Image (tube, helix red, strand yellow):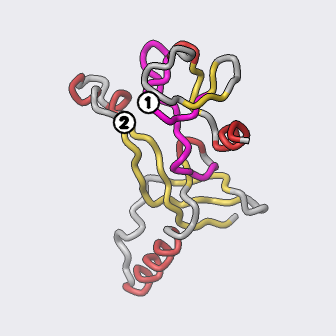
Amino acid sequence: MSWNYRVGTHVFSYKKVFTSNPKLAEMKDERLFSMIEVYYDEDGKPNGYADKINPTDNWEDLQDLIGTLDLLKLAVDKPIIDIDNFPNEWNPLAKVSIYNEEGYVDNLEVWDYVVTKKGKVLQITHDDMSNLTYQEIERHATLEEIEKFKK
């Protein structure tokens, strides 16, 4: 098994974390980035990660710290790992669906691509689309579904 440092990203949900603080729970979710350790199987595919790390802390030797910093610099040139969909790579064009209490996708914006409950891919072109209600939307479309839709 091998490992390396990678940049990882996930959506931080104030609603899930601050359940006892209604004011903080109302804050909009945000995407966060951090350095993670990614572990690979024999075929070189990611099969695990550690995200609660501080790789620059508590080194007994300055050269070891410098070597770690060099490895961290290499990590920023690699594709970013989508922790919410591990082991997939994150793409800023793709969106993770966040659902409200009623079960509807809560983070929809104009120009998003979505998949309906009937499996149809559509693009939201304006705020009030008469042919698409919130109840009909299943989730955001994947990049593969978007590419197929555009053809």
Precedes in sequence: disc 2 or disc 1: 2
Q: Quadrant of residue 4?
A: bottom right
Q: Horizontal and vertical percent for residue 140?
A: 57, 32
Q: Main secondary structure of the magenta part?
A: loop
Q: Say above or below: 136 vs 29.
A: above
What quarter of the picture does the N terminus occupy? Answer: bottom right
Question: What residue is disc 2 on?
Answer: 29
Q: Report how far apart the C-alphas of labels 2 and 1 lie in the structure.
A: 9 Å
Q: Say above or below: 40 vs 29.
A: below
**Please, what is the three-letter code of the amino acid marked with disc 1?**
Asn
The one of 133 and 70 positioned closer to us in this rendering: 133
**Please, what is the three-letter code of the amino acid marked with disc 2?**
Asp
Mark 1 neighbour density, 10 Å: few (under 14) some (14–19) many (20 or more): some
The one of 11 and 149 positioned closer to us in this rendering: 149
Which residue is painted at 77% across and 62% down in the image? 42
Mark 2 neighbour density, 10 Å: few (under 14) some (14–19) many (20 or more): some
Q: Horizontal and vertical percent for residue 108?
A: 46, 29
Cβ–Cβ under 8 Å for marks 2 and 1: yes
- Numbered range of the magenta stretch: 87-114
Question: What residue is disc 1 on?
Answer: 107
